[in-house]
Structure formats: structure tokens, C-alpha cells
Image (tube, rainbow, N blue to C red):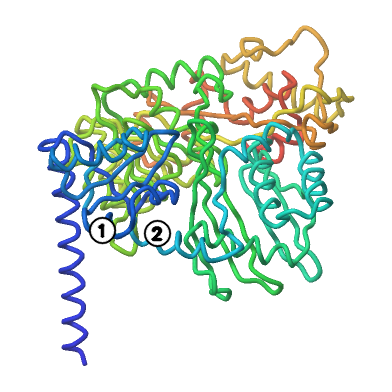
Amino acid sequence: MSIIFDDEKQNKNLADLQKQEEEDLVQTLAEARYGIPPVHLASMPIENDALRLIDEAEARKEEVAAFKLLGKDVHVAMRSPQPDKIANWTKFFKDREYIPHFYMASLASLEKAWERYKEISYAVETKSGSMAISGEALKKLIMNIKNVEDIKKAVQDIEKDNIHTTSHILEIALAGAVAINASDIHFEPEENTVRLRFRLDGILHEVMEIPPAAHKFINSRIKLISGLKITANSIAQDGRFSIWLDQDEISLRVSLIPGAYGESIVMRILNPKSIRVKLEDMGVEPKLYDIFLKEIHKPNGLILLTGPTGSGKTTTLYSFLQKIYSTEIKIITIEDPIEYHLPGITQTQTDAEKGYTFLEGLRSALRQDPDVIMVGEIRDGETAKIAVESALTGHLVFSTLHTNNAAGVIPRLIDLDVNPKILVSALSLSIAQRLVRRLCVHCKKERVIKPEELELINTMIAKAKSYNKDFADYGVDLSNPFKLYDPVGCLECNNTGFKGQIGIFEAIYNDAKIEDIIVKNPSEREIKEAARNQVSLTIQEDGMVKILKGITSYDEVGGVVDFYEE
């Protein structure tokens, strides 16, 4: 029995090795020999509308796959992109008034695309899920949706007409979520109904209830378009699909888990517009912004972000990459998962089952001669050590770390067995961030300041001043009585009182005091004290500045930071 098991294991390892060798060969030959980019289809969404352009038998015979369609631009992967084949397929698509863009792919990669032909066949045979998610249809719906009430009205209107109700509920939910900038859509079955909720600015809001019968068809349709097993109802499943709006591909990551009254569905919306936030528009105060610019434009160093899940770390990292991107430098990212595709940047996704971890990704990335590396997260000592060594050998490294604040970065790295003497030269910047909701400018209301709030504000301003930080330099009017605002709620903000989010930040950069203390294995308190004279505000001070400027509320900031933390 053990011999058979060992043979099977060896055969699997050999097959995996052969597949990897073919992927490596594609990476080498694509641009060097054929002058076209490589593509790895296993980690990309395959669009059914693109796949339909080539018959399955022809695609398999010629070893090609059309995987993306944007207007009249069709993206085509080929195993052997010989000039004559390129010419033939160019004519094929131009005769049909399409503009082809060619890529080189491995056989294993193409087989991942060909598997989706089954989905096309199934979609033709079934009533639920037969209609693809139409970007044009969504665009028309989006134009008529401004708030949650418009979503409810749109569903009520189709129920009156009784036309394709199930299909339309899903499309209205998608269009509504995109229109009002929701990050997630939740279908939550209960005993007698199903709740539809959206996550807006980090908080879940109930949109409406839908009948359980409609939920069953919506469930089947979502499974169909995201490539999941339709008949499997007792296991958790993850999938994804994409929709196109104008020139933007919006990806949706789908998660289903079994529940007492049916499967709970969560769709996370990855809208490229949400990461096109300029660094200067993220709420970074001018003095700290100058520090960020200085550090991210250095040729080497380690820049680490900290903060809880949902605090905007990924958006900040992407804004750094977009700020420094140039055709003259090579940028590689190792992510889990790739949330947004960035043009001009090589992005790779970890795969624990195949042993491609952050550590292995970082090792592999270093062999690609990069100038800048982004590691999604430092989780272990080995990854931390290699990231630090990379920063010392001419690379600029961005990553995230699990700590509560910027001062916690140094003790955490030392806990991961990074040599403090090396850390002195490698670590450039430690950043902590949180997200708070912006008050709706249409309905926010001034309120009376409580005595304990006024005492805290005056104490914080005085303490900052003792370290040469004047709140007046950050736009706070100190000559008049302070004003605090509370949320109210109106149609403009979906009756939440808030619209949009803004970051609050703190950062510690390496200066003489920090360098002197690192080698002494300092505590967080000692690091905070050593950094107090740096120009950056603490995260509490930054939050208070945004409160006093009327950008957000006292309670909102108090919900994410401890005002009384020393």
C-alpha cells in the first residue's frame, strides 16, 4: 500500500514539476522569441462572451482560447504563437470586426479556459442563469439608482410587471451596489425570508427582504456564472466572475456557506475605481505626505503598514505602487489574493496547496531582478528576514504586519528573530492606519461639546504643542470655540449620516533616536517616546484633527482608536 502511495505521490510531483517547467518556459519565450506577453489563465477570470467567439473543437485543435472581451478588443491566449498562426487568427477576428491582442500560455493554462466551455453549454440548457450578466443592462440600471430607496423601488417595479423577476433582482442588486459604492453584497436566508444587505463604508446596512423562492434561483444563477458546483449545497464554495462597465472590469469574489435555512451568499465587489484614490486624497496630512513621498522614492528600504482587516492597507500599498510606477523599474507583487490588476506591474498570487507561500513568492521574485517588491503580508520569521535582507541589497520592499500601531513594528520584527543591528539599516518607515467614515456634508449637524470631550481636546492639543506640533498647522481653527458634528441621515447618504471614508495615520521613520534605540530591543512605549519629536502626528492626534475640521465625528474616531492610550 505504501509503495503505491509513494508512486502516486511521485507521479503527482513529477506532473506538477512538468507544469511549472512549462510555465517557466512560457515566461522565457513569450517576449524574447515571439514578442508577445505571457499570460497565466489559471489565476484570471475567463469571460464566457469571449470564449464563445471560438468553437470549442477548433480552440482545442488549434490550442487557443479567447479569454477577455472589451468592446471590440478581444484578448487571445495561444500555446504556440507562430507568425503564420498569428496572421490566420488576426484575419479570423478582423473578418468579424474584432481587434485581437495575443498572449502566450501553457497547455495547462489553456485547459483551465477550455473547462469553461461546459459552463456555456449548461447555460444554454437551463432557464436560471442562462442570461449572462450584461454590462450595458447594468449601466442603464446604475443611471437610475442613487440610493437604497431607488434599489427597493426598482425591485418593486419588476415585481409588479412580473417579468424575469429573479434575474432582475440579482442585476438590480449588482447595479445598486456599484452605484452607491458598496463593497459587499450579502444574501442571508432566514426561516421565512432572505435579507439583502450591503456593506457601505465598512458598515452593513439592510436593503430589503426577498422571498426564499427567489433566493433559490439567485443562488443557482450565481453558482453558474462563478463556476461553482450547482448541486453542492452542504459545502462551502468560493468562486468569482466579472462584469464590464465602460472600460473597467469589475470582479466579484463569491463565497457561499451552508446555513440552517439555505446557503448564505457574500459577493465582494472589486471595483478598480476604488483603488484609483490618489495618495494625496486619502487623508494624509501634508507633513506626513512629504515623508511618504521621500521614503517611497528611495531606491531601497523596508516600508511596513499595520492596521486591522478593512483598514485600507491594500489601497495604500497600491497607491504607493502607482505613485512610483515607471517603465524604467520592475515591480513585482506577491498577494493573497490578487484583488486588483495593476497595468505594468507583475502580480503573482500565493497558492498554499502548491507550496507557493509569501516566503516562496518572495524568494522567486528576487530571482526576477526587481527594483520594487510588494509582499502582501509578513507572517513568519523567514519571510521577515528575507524582506529585511532584500531592503539591504538594493530593493524597495512594501509589506504589511500585524501590530496595533506604528511603534509595534520594531518589537514585532525582533520577535520574528530579525537581527536588530540589521533592522537599523533596513527599516525606513512604519505606518499605522485606520479608516473612518466621512460625515455627509448635506446633513451633518453641529452639537454641544461635552465637558469631558473639551477636556480631552485641550489636553491633546497642549501635549502635541509640547512636542512642537501645532494643530493650527493642520487646519484647525484655535482662535474660536471648537465645533463638533454628528451624523443625521438623508437620501444623499442613504440615511446613514456618512458618505465615503478617509484614513487616519501615524508613522515612525528612522532617525538618530530610533536607530539608537532599536539595538536595545525596545518596548512600544520606549519607541513612542523616542518618536514623539518627529513631525508626524499620532493616530489619535490625526483623528482629532479630522474631528475638529468637521470631516468626521467624535464617536466615529473613538470607535477605531483609544484616545487615552499613552
Give the side of residue 453 with respect to residue 549, left or right. Answer: right
Viewer-nearest residue: 73 or 45: 73
The percent coordinates of residue 283 (x first, y second) are 58, 23
- Can you identify the residue that label 2 sits on? 116
Residue at image location 69% in from the left, 31% down from the top:
143
Q: How many marks do you count on the picture?
A: 2
| Amino acid beneath label 2 | Arg
Q: Residue furthest left?
A: 33
| Amino acid beneath label 1 | Arg
Q: Quadrant of the N terminus?
A: bottom left
The percent coordinates of residue 460 (x first, y second) are 69, 24
Give the side of residue 446 with respect to residue 15, left or right. Answer: right
Residue at image location 51% in from the left, 65% down from the top:
237
Element type where label 1 sits in the image? helix
Element type where label 2 sits in the image? loop
**Callout 2: 10 Å neighbours few (<14), some, many (20+)?**
some
Viewer-nearest residue: 435 or 351: 351
545 versus 396 height, above or below: above
425 versus 184 height, above or below: above
Give the side of residue 498 with respect to residue 353, left or right. Answer: right
Instruction: For marks 1 and 2, give the CA distance.
Output: 12 Å
Residue 286 in sight: yes
Residue at image location 43% in from the left, 36% down from the top:
70
- The image quadrant of residue 135 is top right
- Can you identify the residue that label 1 sits on? 60
Q: Residue furthest top?
A: 479
Viewer-nearest residue: 25 or 214: 214
Q: Earlier in the sequence, mark 1 or mark 2?
A: 1
The percent coordinates of residue 248 (x first, y second) are 49, 34
